[in-house]
Image (cartoon, helix red, strand yellow):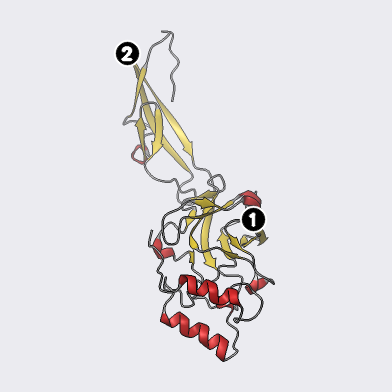
Amino acid sequence: MSTSDPNIGDTFTYALVSGTGDTDNGAFNILGNILRANSNLDFETKSSYSIRVRSTDQGLLSTEKVFIISATDLNELVSVSINGADTFLNSNQRSQLTSIVVVLDRPLVSPSSAFTLTNIGLLSASDTTLSSSQILVSSVGNVYTLRFASGPGVISRIGSGNRANSLADGNWRLTLSESEISGKNQFGTQAIDNFFRMYGDADGDGDVDGTDSVALRNAQLAGSYNAALDWDGNGSVTSGLDITNFSANLRKRRRLF
């Protein structure tokens, strides 16, 4: 906020005051010369706000003015589903993380730059962001499917669909561009989101234990393919990579942030 005054160098204080046009004063506060909303403005609930502000100079002279604040109608996050494009994968498992389906309330303007994926650490805290070129975005209307190109933070696998590349082990955080998404624009910021990948965790409970060992053995002995335990995506659960990487995680539990 600023005030024009013939006295050069004069300074001003600002306050929300009662009077005509003060309808929405309670939704805002002033810090110094900055007007701040007390909470996120929701266009769908209210598209404009009326406030009354007093500006007072060093000589205690003041003037008041009514301002109309317009809320911007930004996109909103509706839902996020892990492996939502890969129905062959057991929806409970966290052994593979091959796709993310994001639903918004309307299409994005720039989908190629709207998504950021950060690995915040599986067993200990870390902060590693996937290269933007590794996030492959496709869409149908306001539904966006994210897959992953080879590179740091991604496990290269053979095939497509449920045998496509997987995010590497880690707790993950998906951030959507604040310039396009209003309100909640992150998924994976809480342990309850269960947005993690831990190879071998066939039941999605956050560890690799005896139950998962039984699932691996059944897939091998019975010959029944289990996409969740196919490390390299070659269509079977018998390769050395499947066993070696399962053993590396056996008896480990992911951290809860």
Q: Name the residue under label 2.
A: 58
- In the picture, measured across the screen, residue 13 lies left or right of residue 148, that is left
Q: Residue at x 43, y 64 (%)?
A: 193
Vertically, is 190 above or below 98?
A: above
Find the residue positioned furthest to the bottom.
222
- Residue 108 in view in this figure: yes
Name the quarter where the C terminus is drawn. bottom left
**Front-most of residues 5 and 219:** 219
- The three-letter amino acid code for the residue at tag 1 is Gln
Q: Which residue is drawn at 49% across and 68% down?
A: 198
Q: Which of marks 1 and 2 is in front?
A: 1
**Front-most of residues 140 and 68:** 140
Q: In which quarter of the image is residue 137?
A: bottom right
Label 2 SS = loop
Q: Name the residue under label 1.
A: 134
Q: Residue at x 68, y 71 (%)?
A: 158
Find the residue positioned furthest to the top.
7
- In the picture, measured across the screen, residue 94 lies left or right of residue 7, that is right
| Mark 1 vs mark 2, CA separation in Å | 56 Å
Marked residue nearer the N-terminal end (1 or 2): 2
Percent position (x, y) of residue 209?
A: 42, 77
Percent position (x, y) of residue 25?
A: 35, 37
Vertically, is 118 above or below 101?
A: above
